Image: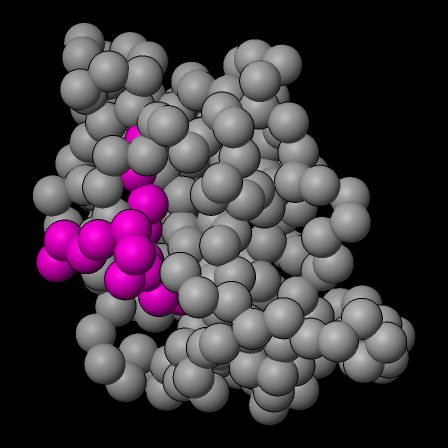
Amino acid sequence: MRRFVLPAAFALAVLAAAPSKAQDYAEVSAYVAATSSMTTSEARVAAAFHRAHDDWAGTRYRYGGMSRSGIDCSALMLIWFRSLYGVNLPRTAAQQATEGERVSRSNLRAGDLVFFSQGTRISHVGVYIGNGQFAHSSSSRGVAITDLSNSYWSPRFRTARRILGVGAETTSPAFEDIDFDSALLDLQSVDLSELAGDEGMDEGMGETADEAPAAPSAPRRW
C-alpha cells in the first residue's frame, strides 16, 4: 500500500501539534489524512479505531475473555464494531473471516478486518487502521497497534474482509458518546462454547519473541 512520506521537519512540527488524546473526528481525521494517503472519509474511520485503541490500550490478552481485565482478539473486534458502527460480528476469528467482502492485502482500507493463522485455520483477527498498521489483542502484548510488515505477523497474514460499507464514517457516534462498556454488558450472554474444539488455538498467537513491537521510531498517527 502506497504511503505518503512527509519531510522530516514538517512531520515533527505536525506531531508536536497533534493531540495526545482524541478530541473529535474533525481534529483527528484531519491529522490522519494529512499524514497519510487516506481520503477524508477513510481517515474518519481510522480515527474511530484509533480512539478505540486509545481506550483499550494495554488491556491484557485472555483467551475467551470479554472484559476490561482481559480480552481475546475476536471479542475485541466484536465489541469495537458493535460500539462504533452497530455491526454484530460472530464470536470467533474463523467465523468473522466469513463476513463481508473479501479484499486483497494491497487494497486494504481503514476498518477492514485482517486475519492470520499458523496453518490453514484462521486463528487471529485485527482491524486495519491505515498506514500499514492494524490494531488487535495478541497474547504477548495485549491490545496494541502493530505493523502488518512485522516479521511475525506478515508471513501469517491469510485474508482480509471488508465489513463496513460506503458511508460508514457518517454513522459512528461522536467521540464522547462511544460506549464500549454498554457493548460489554450486552454481550455477556455470548455462548463461549463456540470457542471449543477447532477454535482451541483461536487468538492464541503472538506468544513469541518474534512478535516484536512496532519500531519506536514510528510516530503515533495522531
Q: Which residue appears at 66% of the width and 46% of the height?
A: 57
The structure residue drawn at horizontal position 46% and vertical position 77%, both measured from the top left corner, is 38
Q: Outermost residue toward the front?
A: 7
Left or right of 71, for residue 21: right
Magenta-span inclusion, residue 104 = yes
**Horizontal and vertical percent position of residue 161:** 21, 52
190 relative to 61, above or below:
below
Tally of numbered tags: 0
Q: Nearer the viewer, residue 114 or 64?
A: 114
In the rendered structure, the answer to whether residue 211 lies left or right of residue 46 reads right
Locate residue 164 relative to residue 66 in the image: left or right.
left
Q: Give coordinates of residue 34: x percent, y percent.
A: 61, 83
Magenta residues?
100-116
Q: Which residue occupies 17% across, 19% down?
A: 120
- At horizontal 52% and vertical 28% (from top left) the residue drawn is 151
- Residue 192 lies in quadrant: top left
Q: Is residue 88 visible?
A: no
Question: Is residue 139 shown above or below 198?
Answer: below
Q: Based on the displayed image, in which of its 4 quarters is residue 23 positioned? A: bottom right
Q: Toward the viewer: 170 or 192? A: 170
Of residues 183 and 104, which is closer to you in this image?
Answer: 104
| Image location of residue 211, percent across then percent down | 57, 24
Most foreground residue, 209 or 69: 209
Q: Is residue 197 magenta?
A: no
Quadrant showing the N terminus:
bottom left
Query: Eyeballing the image, is 51 above or below 191?
Result: below
Which quadrant: the C terminus? bottom right
